[in-house]
Amino acid sequence: MTPVSENPLQPPWLNAPPVEKYPFEESHDLRVGPKLHPALDGLLPYIGLWRGRGKGGFPTIEDFDYAQEIRISHDGRPFLHYESRAWILDEQSRPVRPAGREVGWWRPVLVDGRATDELEAVLTTPTGVMELHLGKRTGTQVEFATDAVVRTPTAKEVTGGHRLFGIVEGALLYAQEMAAMGHGLSPHLSARLVRVGG
């Protein structure tokens, strides 16, 4: 029998010792964790844990109220990690059920190692939609528009989107338009979130 070390079908890591937890810190709080990459200085106001409420709708569905939590964090490299989770609220602001979730990354475009005001973002949902956004930062405002949408065969027919984010009096405000289900860009979500961490 061929020893494991000489068998090309048995890589050396197969019997290696267990790996400890991920050793690098990611933080939404600039007071702790890694140093912010200089390319992210213009996006610094967005880093944090945000929570608030909003209103949603679309031509194919009834309007709804929702609550949302967004975490924007970094790990010292020149991009931000974006994670959003929302839940539907009833007329008394009680949670009804989980709603939309997204994860992704915002990344400033670098030229000669320096950040420009141009941005790229990739956002994915558990419902099978991945959007590539191109955008721009103007002061504390960020605007994105879809450059491409990729969907799984069973995902809802989403064909485009537009998002506008802003930091206004310390709060995170945004409005989102969506093109889907045969409808062109239409208002879909808008919310105001306050910083609860970071």
Image (spheres, rainbow, N blue to C red):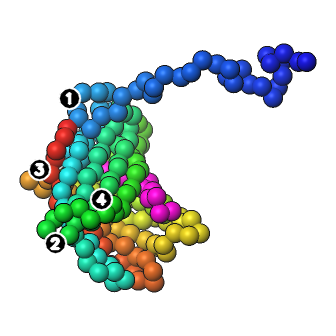
**Cα–Cα gap, marks 4 and 2:** 16 Å
Residue 31's disc is 1
Residue 165's disc is none
* In-image side of 49 versus 108 (left or right): left
Image quadrant in which the N terminus is located? top right
Q: Nearer the viewer, residue 30 or 116?
A: 30
The residue singled out by tag 2 in the image is: 91
Image quadrant in which the C terminus is located? top left
Residue type, mark 2 in image: Glu
Nearer-N-terminus badge (1/4): 1
The residue singled out by tag 4 in the image is: 86
Residue type, mark 1 in image: Arg
Residue 9: give x, y in percent of width and height. Answer: 81, 29
Which residue is rendered at x = 23% and y = 42% of the image? 48
Q: Main secondary structure of the magenta part?
A: strand
**Cα–Cα gap, marks 1 and 4:** 27 Å
Total numbered circles: 4
